[in-house]
Image (spheres, rainbow, N blue to C red):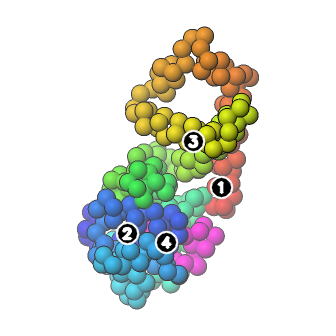
Amino acid sequence: MIAQGPIVLVGCGRLGSAILEGWLLTGTVAAEDLIVLSPSEKPAAEAARTRGARINPPLETLTQARVVVLAVKPAIWRDVMAPIAPFLNDRAMILSVMAGVAAPTLAEGIGGWPIVRVMPTTGVSRGRGVASVWSADARAEAVGRELFAPMAETVVLKDETLMDAATAVAGSGAAYFYAFTDALARAGEAAGLDAATADVLARATLRSAADSMGDDALDALIGRIASPGGSTRAGLDALDQNERLKTMLIDTVAAAVRRNREMGA
């Protein structure tokens, strides 16, 4: 599917650059099949140019575009798409990685092209991202999976309304893990470790836990470490007191969902 025309990446900020780097790293899209539209020079785009990608060519080159990937800020997508849309052919698809902007809103603003929404993490730049995919169009959904599965653990959502929740868990989740890791380091410091040692231990523990996780059930993973009556179980019991951890994370994800919807509106 992808080889039938150029892939146009509109926007090359942090997420757009990560997608571009991931495509080239994994060979998902060949550089010569890429067109990048960016208002300013970006290192990722310049690196792609050296491999054959076209950067900011005349808009007439978009007439054969197979997929247009919208990776701009939600507040400006209408202004960005206005000069692009007249050049797109009937076979083009719109792939949006913008948080909060629903497919009906996109359709109202740019016309009747098939739309697929994908919410990837910036880990796609290293071929180790996470991506949620939704589309009402089966062909567009397949293209979304084809463009992201080689560089991300990809899930297909059954309903678009779940995209905000998926974004809050996966798109924002890495920041929550980092915040937890920082809090763990500070707790180690409070227990007597020096700050540098606490940082090393907390960071290394996060990496080790991720590498050891695999596909096993999370309860089973916890059970392997937290033996009954041991110190790990005592710590977990403190976390579970009055379900503080679950309540905190429910509130955290709910706040992110609300903000996604506000940005889309």
User: Is residue 154 placed above or below 185 in the rendered structure?
Assistant: below
Q: For the residues carrying marks 4 and 2, which lies nearer the camera in this image?
A: 4
Q: CA distance from mark 1 to mark 3?
A: 37 Å
Kind of residue indicated by mark 4: Cys
Residue 220 covered by magenta stretch: no
Disc 4 marks which residue? 12
Tag 1 secondary structure:
helix
Crowd class of label 4 (few under 14; some 14 to 19; many from 20; radius 10 Å): many
Kind of residue indicated by mark 3: Val
Q: For the residues carrying marks 3 and 2, which lies nearer the camera in this image?
A: 3
Asked if marks 1 and 3 touch (Cβ < 8 Å), the reply is no
**Label 1 or label 4, whichever comes before in sequence order:** 4
**Magenta segment boundaries in residue numbering:** 69-81
Q: Nearer the viewer, residue 75 or 138?
A: 75
Q: Residue at x 36, y 79 (%)?
A: 49
Q: Percent position (x, y) of residue 194?
A: 68, 39
Q: CA distance from mark 3 to mark 2?
A: 43 Å
Asked if marks 3 and 2 touch (Cβ < 8 Å), the reply is no
Looking at the magenta stretch, what is its main secondary structure?
helix
Q: Is residue 187 visible?
A: no
Tag 3 secondary structure:
helix
Kind of residue indicated by mark 2: Val
Q: For the residues carrying marks 1 and 3, which lies nearer the camera in this image?
A: 3
| Image quarter of the N terminus | bottom left
Q: Percent position (x, y) of residue 236?
A: 63, 22
Crowd class of label 1 (few under 14; some 14 to 19; many from 20; radius 10 Å): some
Q: Percent position (x, y) of residue 199?
A: 61, 42
Disc 1 marks which residue? 261
**Label 2 or label 1, whichever comes before in sequence order:** 2
Disc 2 marks which residue? 67
Asked if marks 2 and 1 touch (Cβ < 8 Å), the reply is no
Q: CA distance from mark 4 to mark 2?
A: 16 Å
